[in-house]
Amino acid sequence: MLAPAITNALTIDVEDYFQVSAFAPYIRRDEWETRECRVERNVNRILDLLAERQTQATFFTLGWVAERYPQIVRRIVAEGHELASHGYGHERASDLSPEAFTADVTRAKKLLEDLGGTAVQGYRAPSFSIGSSNLWAFDVLARTGHGYSSSIYPIRHDHYGMPDSPRFAYRLANGLLEIPVTTLRLASRNLPSSGGGYFRLLPYALSRWMLRRVNREDREAAVFYFHPWEIDPGQPRVAGINAKTRFRHYVNIDRTEARLQHLLADFRWGRMDQIFLPRLRNGAGG
């Protein structure tokens, strides 16, 4: 049974398993080329799932991945999905200077546009790494021609989060639209309800309930995200990681694809730009 007739935004952060921020202390960047890449296989599987459901989505794609697998960029665009930027090298925005951040997002945007043959309007910071300490990043994104960002997670977390940020899309003074990933407001707290590790950890019924409540009570479109490596239980296991990192990365990874199948059936889904950018054109938000 479908949720109320609201189209939610389905988003995929296109990166490989060895590029996640939690693995940074264990896998050096100069080792990336030596690792078994699984991203092409996994993105193609996701595209197959979406085609079966006649569903469109937004793919926030790393420039590093696009450079090595241009064929998946072209397939994303050819099948009607939105191509958006996840930066070039999966460096946290909060770890970069304004100059380095500008170089990273400019490089990624140009590369994606050249490969995909389409304008790139959206950007998502790796690990939701725009927050109160680096709000200057929004001005960089506006100057470099992006139309929107989806880089803030309005929760409290040990690696990211800006719990006092607005929960839903809002326009900044520079014209950029920020579209936070979805939270549920309950007992004066914002609860994560938009995918990622929480989607794997929590029972699917709870995730579905939270998204339906946002649709019904807030009357807002939800923003859901996941990664290609989360549907890949056969990925190589990274040795030497601590117990917390191991749990977060691998918990219920063998169940994710089946849960996504349910998610695609239970809600209406679409692209970020088609759902939210009309607000910017119409002067809404903020």
Image (tube, helix red, strand yellow):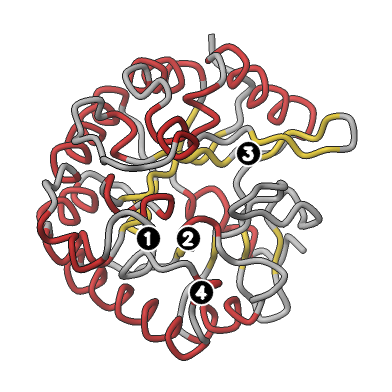
Kindly report the distance in space between the C-alpha atoms of the residues bearing marks 4 and 3.
Answer: 31 Å
Specify the label residue 165 is tagged with: none
Marks 4 and 3, the one that precedes in the sequence: 4
Query: Callout 2, which amino acid?
Result: Arg
Disc 4: which residue: 95
Q: Nearer the viewer, mark 1 or mark 4?
A: 4
CB contact under 8 Å: marks 3 and 1: no
Q: Estimate how packed mark 4 is, as few (under 14), some (14 to 19) or many (20 or more) residues with alpha carbons within 10 Å.
A: few
Disc 1: which residue: 84
Query: Callout 1, which amino acid?
Result: Ala
When the figure is inspected, residue 90 is found, relative to residue 243, above or below; the finding is below
Residue under the point 53% across and 83% down = 140
Marks 1 and 2, the one that precedes in the sequence: 1
CB contact under 8 Å: marks 1 and 2: yes
Disc 3: which residue: 221
* Residue 239, x across and y down, in percent: 26, 40
When the figure is inspected, residue 106 is found, relative to residue 205, above or below; the finding is below
Query: Callout 4, which amino acid?
Result: Asp
| 28 or 270: nearer the viewer | 28
Q: Estimate how packed mark 3 is, as few (under 14), some (14 to 19) or many (20 or more) residues with alpha carbons within 10 Å.
A: many
Specify the label residue 124 is tagged with: 2
Residue under the point 42% across and 86% down = 100
* Residue 206, x across and y down, in percent: 62, 16
Q: Estimate how packed mark 1 is, as few (under 14), some (14 to 19) or many (20 or more) residues with alpha carbons within 10 Å.
A: many
Residue under the point 46% across and 21% down = 263
Q: Which quarter of the picture shows residue 179? A: bottom right
